[in-house]
Image (cartoon, coloured by chain):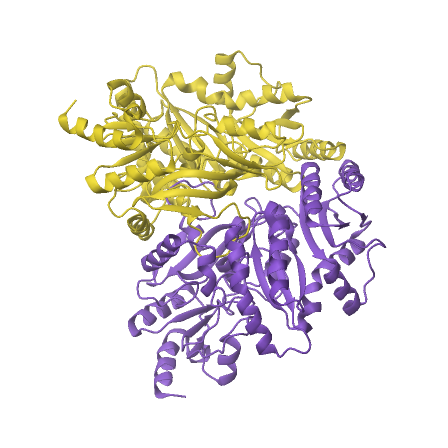
Chain colours: A yellow, B purple
């Protein structure tokens, strides 16, 4: 450890206390990266503030001494937004993990940023309510990080993104100033809504230090349909038919190739005999006999029209969960093939043509690569996974994927899509930002950062340089 | 007309054509103000651009020649946001009023900013869909103006604000640059969402020149309950009980005083014999027998608990509309009393205490003033209306109301509320902005304006100086 690092640690300890500054190798390794695992962590220190005042003091010190800060939540990000690779000080919110207040009438919870998503979900459940933003990492991700990346997940079609549940927010800007935004109000037409600027800003404007989150009514009897389809155009017809008749909660898809991997790896049964090219998974609330009849009749209509080949509907929650596994276990199943993952989106109606184009791009250049498609087709968000052929070394595989990426992102651009649907930009997607945002937009973003973080202490080098 | 004004008109005519520049007295009067009617209009000219390119050219000219621009939609605003009182050029979007595109799968409509809200609602209806943001002025207001003020209305508790329906947006910033924001994507985690900065910015950052709006599934069999209550605390219990059991679409309230005025003026009948101090109006979708039974059972529970004194439920759409009139006709009914109106909000749970405090403030200073309360209690937005006593001259009445306003806004501040729930700040609420937004926030807002409109050509003097 350098003398400089020790001096820094001593200044940090004056703010948070000596027990709250870690500079041991293991801490630096653990807290210096997220789930991306592509970048080599290299932070100068890890600090664990316990209060808003301590966060403010850390920011003021960073401005004075000229070091950079990286906010760190559950570090479950997949774009390197929480990576500290350049001697930054990591500010971890693990100690600020309390639920501070709850109002049953307002259906609002006041959380510190380090509250784990699952902890909030459980708290809501205990109160007879529901926190609806859910995704694979909810057992580790923190609510502050969810808001900083505007996390999405599997129920966006019904409940929206994290953005839609943030009713109030306290932030410490890059100058150390505390702003209290929106105070839990539903309606507040008093100028620019700064809250929305901080949502999805990936820690580049300031620290989110307190959140007021809204809660919903719990869903009733979630019921799942899985339908086999020949092509994605049919899926669009199926989506439209179901959306016209029911308030659907989820509309997911996966390919036959994905299904085969899941069945083989997890020992699961095919949901029904008929094989499709793709499968649609639809969840709805079975609130009444009328709703169930309506769902059945849309299902039959889809089969009659030739949009769906076959299908099955869950009769109880156990069956519903079993059907969800066919979709939810894909990511874990294919992880042993060291997949090259890409989280992209286009407008829903453009998904079929877009998928074909990307398939063609990859196959033309690398006919041996197996492509696994799955994702949230109901909101236009598809996960492209290219599996590494066994014989190909990892480095060479990723080099080849990196090359084909540019063509994929050209396709994203020509379809008006997003190079990062829900994982954020961080470090990983930074080189490709201009495929989704114009030069003018990027210039505006840089100028906005300048307003809140003039000395560039907040997560520098993330989203843009 | 001055020579300067004629020179200006000639330069404007070079961009939009001579028939699209009005400088006659009547045009200046009509297009120089909104429904606020407090400020004396005094624009230099009115222009009617027909394309995005013309809007860009107008902004570039304004930057070059140093004149100011005021965006003008349906001019139904109630805070003077569209008032041109200082020789500005009014840019009216009446000609850019076309629906450009529609996608049934995406449930999205691409609109020019001058599309009337009702035109969009009708278009959605024709497609078997629903544009859910609705309010009294929807027959005149334009969609561009709705977005610029983030319009709310009577169904916010179910469908959210205008913000929630904006999927894409083209804006011309204060430098004349065209930004195309979000491209109709549901998920797009690529940095700061500039779209949300322009929503509610009241034309101070740039012109909204195209919008992609989402549409919803139409509601089924809207059913209305009106309940009499003794006090607003009971209304909170009623709200919680109904929200726990049903997806309610609206939760409004009005006072017995308001009801009496409406009955007298409109010749309407009392909905049931029992008199309350206040009334709650609840709308829900009668989707099934089970939902109706659930609503009835919550209603009975509210009566048993003593929260509701009595009530009635509509049996058909005609009855539902008749019950809505008790609430919707209030504003028009009391207009002959030259009311002093204030559109304010607090967190829902704080409404009862807040209303009492405001009642006390007004009554202590002006015991003769009659206060009429009504509004969207389910989202915390209440409309305070003080009626002018017949004997008091208008000017003196408004002077006295203006004096008591400061005390009312002190109460708003102490409750963490908003001095403008849904009408925006414009000119009318500008003096009171600091009761809802901190000095730090206002400084940030000014710096953000500087990013998009460095030469202050866009609606200067609105929201803040």
Which residue occupies 60% across, 37% down? Answer: A216
Instruction: Work out whether residue A87 or residue A178 is closer to the camera in this orientation and state it.
Output: A178
Residue B203 locus on image (x, y percent): 44, 63
Taking the view exactly as shown, the residue that stands out farthest to the top is A267
Taking the view exactly as shown, the residue that stands out farthest to the left is A3
Query: In this rendering, would A135 be left or right of B206?
Result: right
Residue A283 locus on image (x, y percent): 61, 30
Query: In this rendering, would B111 be left or right of A71?
Result: right
User: Does A367 appear above or below B332?
Assistant: above
Query: In this rendering, would B330 be left or right of A447?
Result: right
Q: Quadrant of the C terminus of chain A?
A: top left
Residue A327 locus on image (x, y percent): 52, 24
Is residue B159 something that shows in the picture?
no
Q: Residue B261's image quarter? A: bottom right
User: Does B164 appear above or below B5?
Assistant: above
Is residue A416 something that shows in the picture?
yes
Question: Number of marks in the image?
Answer: 0
Which residue occupies 57% across, 21% down? Answer: A275
Q: Residue A240's image quarter? A: top right
Q: Quadrant of the N terminus of chain A?
A: top left
Instruction: Work out whether residue A14 or residue A223 is closer to the camera in this orientation and state it.
Output: A14
Which residue occupies 57% across, 69% down? Answer: B401
Residue B406 locus on image (x, y percent): 51, 63
Taking the view exactly as shown, the residue that stands out farthest to the right is B273
């Amino acid at each position: 450890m350098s003398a400089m690092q020790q001096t820094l640690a001593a200044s940090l300890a004056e703010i948070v206390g000596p027990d709250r500054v870690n500079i041991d190798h293991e801490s630096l390794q653990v807290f210096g990266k997220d789930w991306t695992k592509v970048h080599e962590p290299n932070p100068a220190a890890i600090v664990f503030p316990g209060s808003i005042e301590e966060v403010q003091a850390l920011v003021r010190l960073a401005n004075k001494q000229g070091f950079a800060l990286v906010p760190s939540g559950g570090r479950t990000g997949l774009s390197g937004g929480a990576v500290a690779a350049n001697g930054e000080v990591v500010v971890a919110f693990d100690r600020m993990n309390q639920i501070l207040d709850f109002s049953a009438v307002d259906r609002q919870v006041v959380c510190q940023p380090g509250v784990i998503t699952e902890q909030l979900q459980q708290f809501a459940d205990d109160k007879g309510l529901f926190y609806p933003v859910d995704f694979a990492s909810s057992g580790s991700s923190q609510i502050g990080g969810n808001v900083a990346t505007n996390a999405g997940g599997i129920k966006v079609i019904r409940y929206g993104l994290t953005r839609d549940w943030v009713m109030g927010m306290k932030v410490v800007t890059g100058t150390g100033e505390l702003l209290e935004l929106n105070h839990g109000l539903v309606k507040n037409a008093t100028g620019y809504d700064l809250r929305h600027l901080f949502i999805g800003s990936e820690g580049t404007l300031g620290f989110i230090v307190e959140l007021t989150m809204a809660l919903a009514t719990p869903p009733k009897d979630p019921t799942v349909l899985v339908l086999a389809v020949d092509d994605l155009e049919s899926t669009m017809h199926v989506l439209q038919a179901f959306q016209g008749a029911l308030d659907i909660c989820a509309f997911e898809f996966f390919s036959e190739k994905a299904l085969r991997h899941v069945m083989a790896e997890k020992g699961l049964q095919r949901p029904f005999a008929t094989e499709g090219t793709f499968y649609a998974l639809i969840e709805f609330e079975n609130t009444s006999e009328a709703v169930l009849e309506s769902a059945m009749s849309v299902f039959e209509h889809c089969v009659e029209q030739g949009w769906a080949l076959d299908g099955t509907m869950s009769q109880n929650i156990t069956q519903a969960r079993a059907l969800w596994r066919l979709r939810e276990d894909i990511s874990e199943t294919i992880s042993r093939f060291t997949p090259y993952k890409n989280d992209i989106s286009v407008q829903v109606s453009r998904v079929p043509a877009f998928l074909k184009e990307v398939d063609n791009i990859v196959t033309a250049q690398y006919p041996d690569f197996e492509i696994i498609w799955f994702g949230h087709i109901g909101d236009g968000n598809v996960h492209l996974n290219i599996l590494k052929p066994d014989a190909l070394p990892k480095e060479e595989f990723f080099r080849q994927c990196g090359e084909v990426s540019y063509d994929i992102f050209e396709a994203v651009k020509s379809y008006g899509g997003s190079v990062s649907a829900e994982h954020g930009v961080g470090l990983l997607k930074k080189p490709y930002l201009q495929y989704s945002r114009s030069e003018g937009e990027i210039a505006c973003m840089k100028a906005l950062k300048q307003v809140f973080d003039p000395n560039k202490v907040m997560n520098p080098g993330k989203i843009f340089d």
